[in-house]
Image: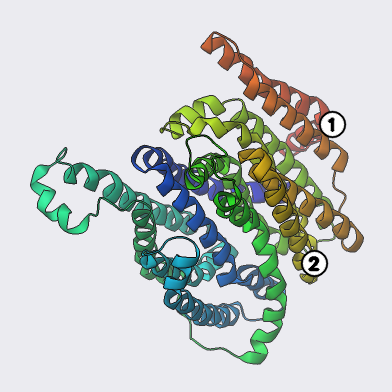
Amino acid sequence: MSQLKKLAGQTAIYGISSILGKTINFLLLPIYTAYLAKEELGSFTTIYAFIAFLNIIFTYGMETTYFRYATGKGLDPQKVFAQIQSLLITTSISMGAIIYFSAPALASWLGYEGQDYLFCWMAWILAIDAILALPYAKLRKENKALPFALTKLGNILLNVGFNIFFIVFCFHVWNGELLPSLQPFVNTIYNSDWGVEYILLSNLLANSLMIPVFFKLSGKFVFGMDKEFLQPMWHYAVPLLFMGLAGVTNEVFSRGLFEYVLPENFYEGLSQREAGGIFGANFRLAIFMNLIIQAFKYAAEPFFFNQSTDKNSPALFARVMHAFVIFCSLLMVMVSVNLDLLGSFFLRGEGYSEALYIVPVLLLGYLFLGIYFNLSIWFKLTDQTKYSFYITAIGALVTVIVIFVFVPILGYMGAALSTLLSYFIMAVVCYFFGQKYFPIPYQTGKDTFYLVFAFGLSYLGFFLEIEQAVLQFITRNSLVIVFVLVVLWLEKEELRKFSNQLKKRKP
């Protein structure tokens, strides 16, 4: 139980920073939906889907590789850090330069003629993100959760601050509605035709300002690349590149391709890019699940590696999975039954709420992604990372098929189903291979029941309509209590054991 408490403590710190940070960042959604046109929000959705995908390529599994070789191979952790960081700096600048000089072609290909600068900024954002990835991993490895959390929050606050400055403050000054004395200055830096441009520019400025802060926190290192020293790490990392793509495959295909696959006039009065903006805005509501998964991943990855030599680690990993499924299932119900309130708060523009019905499907999809992250520990610990490629390829194939078959028929729901089915199949395949090579006694029956039960309650609460608003709120949220009571009843033996352990520890 002490190991679980340690993991829970680390997850809490990462989780608080992640929740606060994502919440602060998420508060930009009402600003975007209020100040930007749906077409601009569609551009934001598409461009950031590609950034998420390319971000994985820029880091190509080196964070997990650093954990593996700095903790379990008997190597000097500082040398491992220096070598991998040197490699990442070199490859990040090289790949960034390729995108930078290819910006005109990319802009033309993706339908952004005359906006080459967007892809130049994208190149810089990707390069800086990749260069900062390993210093972040080093803080996690050294259990420096607080500095990690504070720097993450600092970066997000800068990003949000720049967004508010350009999109809200400068707009009102330029429009003569606020501080007219600043209008001459604002006129020199503000372009009223820009929308998604300010989102990218804010991201770039915030990331750039974090570079000196983060290199100070992570410590000095000697630049150098020893081919023989790096070669086994490279072989370990490359398959993880494909595993990393698992987490963003759907972001690219379901969000990035949505506007290109959706037939014209599928939604009356909306262009394909405007419909993409609506889908992207609703997709962002799944952040409530995604941020918990991200916080868990930050804490769990080094935790799993540190516990891997313990003979009781399989049982521990199973308990972690069980707790994860219960907590995330509860979260899914809580968010789904309150989507009407969340939608009215975060989606300020007209027409956005028409796609709210896809959010429970997206929440369950992200939950399966979290399950996949739990299950994937088997091929990381057995150095069989090649399986990440096979599993990701299967997931990508499912995504492509579902997108091209169901989006023209079901629209928003077709894209949401691509997220759910891809992550579900990846989790199932990973489970069966894992039980063959690294058996872990997961509580599969119970976990499956909780997932199905929670998903059913989620849609029951979402569609439950009662004329009186207060009564509707109470009735919908009573389903959360129903789920909790069922969990308490099914887990009564585990809770009794835990209670007895606590009593024994008391003096």
Quarter the C terminus occupies = top right
Looking at the image, the residue that sits furthest to the right is: 436
Residue tagged 1: 493
Q: Residue at x 46, y 27 (%)?
A: 344
Which label belongs to residue 430? Answer: none
How far apart are labels 1 and 2 at the CA level?
36 Å
Q: Is residue 428 above or below residue 106?
A: above
Which label belongs to residue 387? Answer: 2
> SS at mark 2?
helix
Q: Quadrant of residue 116?
A: bottom left
Q: Name which residue type carries label 2.
A: Tyr
Q: Of the residues under marks 1 and 2, which one precedes in the sequence?
A: 2
Query: Which marked residue is nearer to the observer: mark 1 or mark 2?
Result: 2
Nearer the observer, 337 or 272: 272
Q: Does residue 339 appear left or right of residue 423 in this picture?
A: left
| Residue 369 visible at all | no
Looking at the image, the residue that sits furthest to the top is: 468
Looking at the image, the residue that sits furthest to the front is: 265
Q: Residue at x 10, y 43 (%)?
A: 180
Q: Name which residue type carries label 1.
A: Glu
Q: Is residue 227 above or below residue 27?
A: below
Q: Is residue 323 above or below residue 75?
A: above
The reply to whether discs 1 and 2 touch (Cβ–Cβ < 8 Å) is no
| Residue 444 visible at all | yes
Q: Does residue 463 appear left or right of residue 268 in this picture?
A: right
Q: Position of residue 79 (x, y in %)?
A: 58, 82
Q: Does residue 419 appear left or right of residue 39 in this picture?
A: right
Q: Quadrant of residue 210?
A: bottom left
Q: Position of residue 428 (x, y in %)?
A: 82, 51
